[in-house]
Amino acid sequence: MASNAAPAPNSPVPAPPVAVVHRPRPWRAFVRKFLHQPVTVAASVVLLAILVAAVVGASHYQLAQTPDYSAVLKPPSAKHLFGTDEFGRDLFQRVLAGAHMSILVGVSSVFVGSIIGTLLGLIAGYYGGWREGLIMRLTDILLAFPGIVLAIGIMAVLGSGMINVIIAVAIFTVPIFVRLVQGTTLAVKELTYIEAARTVGVGDARILFRYVFPNVLPTIVVYFTMRIGSAILISASLGFLGLGVSPSEPEWGAMLTSAQEYIRNAPWTIMAPGLAILITVIAFNLVGDGLRDAVDPKLKL
Amino acid sequence: MGQYILRRLLNAIPILVVVSIIIFLFLHMIPGDPARIAAGPDATAQEIEFTRVRLGLDKPLYVQYFIFIRNLVTGNLGVSNRTGMSVASEIGQHLWPTVQLTILSIVWAVIIGMVVGVVAALYRSRWPDVVGMVGSVTGISIPDMWLGMILIEFFAVRLGWFPVAGYGGWGHIIMPSFTLGLGVAAVTARFARTSVIEVLEEDYVRTARAKGLPRRKVIWKHALRNALIPVITMTGLQFGFLLGGAVVTETVFNWPGIGQLLVQSVEYRDYPTVQALMMLFSVEFILINLLVDVLYAVVNPRIQLR
């Protein structure tokens, strides 16, 4: 902050350079490290573009669903940038509307999952005892199903629909954050200043959120970014399997399912949604990698 | 060691009990009459009543649970609504293809992952490293269904090297196992690269170089051997996850495994089969993870079993 610097004296002669003692500024060091990674910066730009597309995509839903039977399965052209599908719907519009859906599902499911997971992880790590036992066993149970199987089981109960996909992927995300936050909390709570805070009578809730949580936050942010990539993959897979949003929706996974039949004569129908998923997930993963290296290069994820 | 395995097995029991309760309650969580749901969409009123009695759905919930467990343990998993076959024989038919698929995927993952990881480490910061790591990020991020479709279109339809889909000889398994294994290969490559780079900086490697051993010999005899043991076990840890990944791959390639069976059963609301499969996936996953942990400890004595 400029206000911290010594006030400039009102003299015509510039003051001689003074060695200003800077307090360590972790935030600035982080930004510098982050910007020093060209790949990460490039991925951030791509990610930003995808987020803009996701926002714009919301208003393109109608266009994405409008059939045009005079332009069925047309290859990419100036009029239809990514070509058209079996109903003559413009694939560019559909991919754009799909960006809205995928980002919405990915971000909100990981957001919900990470908040629940973080709270449970903080409680388990800080209090220990029966609370820890209960929460960690619960986590083990959620982790007892390999990969997408848990999400499939939840979808079987809830039925298809976007909200249900968000719920399924959020539940899938919870145990990962519980483990992560619980581990870090265990280490942090032994630090002297937490001990000191407790001794002078600071309440548990305040300790947890003022002192423990900031220590856990960098790891959460890194994981948050990476998990959005996985969440988008999982929801696209559910869509592909016919267990996600309704198959008629412009969702990337569901678009792949219907395109499968036309791959022979209209390969562009699988290229647009497939590349959209791939580029989006790569962008989230690379930005996550970059955040990790900038936060703490020794962090093994 | 024996004690550790025993304790891990004992720990797994309460988890499996709760998992079984959740899977049991599954039928009751779906809105609607459980007997109607279990009997399937095409059941007659008589069949629904028969199912109600057979599953004990007229009895109190805890009695129903014990019947469910008894049936699970004795292998009496009910009848598939979809095929009319017993669920047990249905699963029996689909299990082996999935086992074949996952094993070959692990082979792909180890071979590709190690070669890419080692080459990247040996040419650190030069173009093979860059290419390898770009490939690794792509491999982690690529959707399985899309990769599968592209492989089918290119290698099966255009070039005709492999059959398009289905179950059969070696030709049939190459593409699905590659599709399933690529994600794990990507993770393995990253891990192998880090491991080899770390070992190359060890003192004993420098000593070997200093005493005049040729570079090739140092790399093969000293560095790689030590670097790659943890990589192999790390890959083993991914094995359980392949079971889950098989769901999508099997669907793309029409591979008659338990993953495809699960998707079909969910689509058809064949809940007895869904319940049995969820239980099977969970038991397999827990046992495989236990096995891998134990193997990891056997190969790597520095790991303390707690």
Image (cartoon, rainbow, N blue to C red):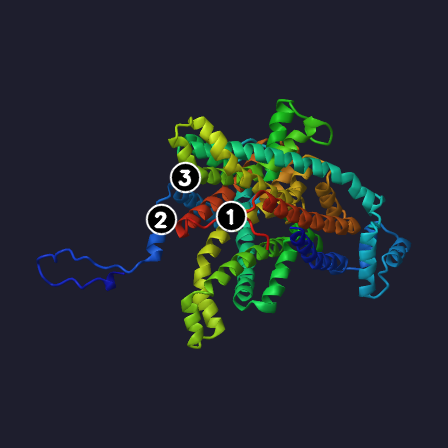
Comes first in the chain, label 1 or label 2 = 2
Rate crowding at label 2 as few (under 14), some (14 to 19) or many (20 or more) other CA atoms within 10 Å. some
Q: Which mark is residue A57?
A: 1
Observer-nearest of B133 and B194: B194
Pointer 3: what residue? B203
| Residue A265 position by quadrant | top right
Name the mark nearer the viewer: 3 or 1. Answer: 3
Quarter of the figure with the N terminus of chain A: bottom left
Is residue B161 positioned above or below A174 on the image? above
Q: Could you tell me which secondary element the residue under label 3 belongs to?
A: helix
Observer-nearest of A254 and B263: B263
Rate crowding at label 3 as few (under 14), some (14 to 19) or many (20 or more) other CA atoms within 10 Å. few
**Three-letter residue code for mark 2:** Lys
Q: Does the CB distance between marks 3 and 2 fall below 8 Å?
A: no
**Three-letter residue code for mark 1:** Gly
**Image x and y of residue A27, in percent:** 35, 56
**Image x and y of residue A210, in percent:** 43, 68
Alpha-carbon span between mark 1 and mark 2: 33 Å
A283 displayed left or right of A236 = left
Chain at numbered mark 2: A
The residue drawn where x is 46% and y is 33% is B120
The residue drawn where x is 69% and y is 54% is B6
Alpha-carbon span between mark 3 and mark 2: 30 Å
Is residue B62 positioned above or below B117 on the image? below
Pointer 2: what residue? A33
Q: Do labels 1 and 2 share a chain?
A: yes
Name the mark nearer the viewer: 1 or 2. Answer: 2
Q: Could you tell me which secondary element the residue under label 2 belongs to?
A: helix
**Three-letter residue code for mark 3:** Asp
Rate crowding at label 1 as few (under 14), some (14 to 19) or many (20 or more) other CA atoms within 10 Å. many
